[in-house]
Image (cartoon, rainbow, N blue to C red):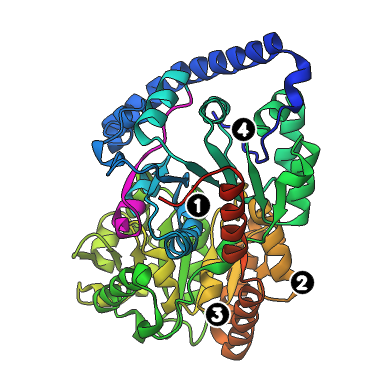
Amino acid sequence: MSLEVHTGSSSLFLSLGKHQSQSMYFLYSFALLLLFLALLPYFVYQAARHGKYAGSFKERLGWLPASVRGDGRKPIWIHAVSVGEFVAARPLIEQLRSELPTNRIVVSTATQTGQQLARSQSHLFECAFYFPFDWKFSVRRALGRVNPSVVIILETELWPNFLNECRRRGVVVILANGRISPRSFGRYQRVGSFVRRVVQDFSLMVMQSDGDAERARMLGARPDHVRVCGNLKYDLPEVAEAEASVSEAHRWAFDRCEELDRQFALSSSAHLIVAGSTAPGEENMLLTAFRLVRSRNGLEDTRLIIAPRHPERFDEVADLLSRSGYTFARRSLEKVTSAAEARAAGADSSAEAGRIADVPTSSSAADLILLDTIGELAGIYRFATVVFVGGSLVPRGGHNIIEPAAFAKPIVVGPYTENFRQIVSDFERADAVVQLNATGQELVSSLERELSGLLSDRERARALGKRARNILLANRGATECTVAAIEEVMKAGGVKPQ
């Protein structure tokens, strides 16, 4: 249970009294316990069915691996809750490595997918582990093990007990790439006095926009503890450049891209749609639109890659795709389901399904590809003709559109993008993204029209992608600004390079 927020440290809340402060933390901890007990059956089910939580439970209770201690130097602890936050943290980690080469860096995540991605790129830091549950005993145990000099939290997480314990220990806590949506701001105001006390435990809040900064101040952040540096995700490596110019941290991604190309012959695909970070309900809509796209003259060879946001849905989506009537492949497997096999397995018997030619069961022949792996989506965008970014056809708030923009790809999103309102707004003003505004069945029709239009009109697609990349390049610099602010706060707090 997190209060997604951000801000600076001080004693502004002391006027409310020590007893009231203790009461609020007690009520928060009690509510957290009730929530955990209510969700316990879900945790047990996910552990038994999908292997989630079982391997991480010990770390979440604060029993961290011995490797976090390292050689005794106090590390910089960076917390990135999941994949998106870790992606944003990568340029920050690289820059900190460059500016503070003698400091140890450790990374925590809260999700399994984030942990898998972090551990796959462990050459960037000394150790990766799971963030502790926000109970006093687990927080104290974890902080005692790590013994950090600085904690940097990415984006929108605030854990009251963790932050309170950091303040008690004199640990500098910084929010980086902070954002507060108007909807979240309204929720925080309902518990305004508690949020005001909690945000005082931040030494610095580095926000993405002026609007985010203003909302942080209105929630109780001291004005001199809030800065605006832009969005770290605009500083993603320029992965579309030649491999020779790519940093060591991202050479891994290029190697995986070459492997993907060999497996699926992506670079030779004339019409390729990549649908990234899809949510429940979106795959059916995409398949309907895909079927309509393929019915158009000149687009019969269109292929579709679907990358679900959450790994626990891989099998569910695989089952759906295998019954679509199209040849289908999973990234994690060698075998491809042919059209005949799909029909035999119960694919619908539409005219389109009936006229699909049976092709050799090789990965390079698949019409549909399920990207059921972690950390490869950003790289696979480079092969796309058109990109759809998920979580936006259904009310999930959308996902980040910056990664496909780095490859100058034309981007389509649905109407639900409030999680990235500022970024989408920036792109819309520059005519650098296509946002659908339809609802109901018309939404699928609108999706198909835009996908078909961009697949057919290469000049329009190139222009749209170029504008998207230009927006990205024009907003670079957040990493440098953020690191400078971090170093300033570290120096002011007496934190020395180690």
Q: Judge the density around disc 4: few (<14), some (14-19), many (≥20) Cα neighbours within 10 Å.
A: some
Return the residue at label 2.
Answer: 429
Q: Amino acid at mark 2?
A: Arg
Pick whichever of labels 1 and 4 is earlier in the sequence. 4
Image vertical order of residue 422 relative to residue 185, above or below: below
The magenta segment: 118-134
Image vertical order of residue 36 relative to residue 225, above or below: above
Return the residue at label 3.
Answer: 408
Image quarter of residue 398: bottom right
Pick whichever of labels 1 and 3 is earlier in the sequence. 1
In the current view of this chain or complex, which residue is farthest to the bottom?
Answer: 459
Frontmost residue, 392 versus 335: 392
Given this view, does label 2 or label 4 mark the residue nearer the observer?
Answer: 4
Q: Judge the density around disc 1: few (<14), some (14-19), many (≥20) Cα neighbours within 10 Å.
A: many
Q: What residue is shown at x 39% (from left), y 42% (from top)? A: 74
Q: Position of residue 355 (x, y in %)?
A: 36, 75
Q: Amino acid at mark 1?
A: Glu
Pick whichever of labels 1 and 2 is earlier in the sequence. 1
Q: CA distance from mark 4 to mark 3?
A: 35 Å
Q: Are marks 1 and 2 in contact (CB under 8 Å)?
A: no
Q: Is residue 358 visible?
A: no
Residue 162 is tagged as none
Dot 4 falls on a residue whose secondary structure is loop
Q: Judge the density around disc 3: few (<14), some (14-19), many (≥20) Cα neighbours within 10 Å.
A: many
Frontmost residue, 347 versus 317: 317
Dot 3 falls on a residue whose secondary structure is loop
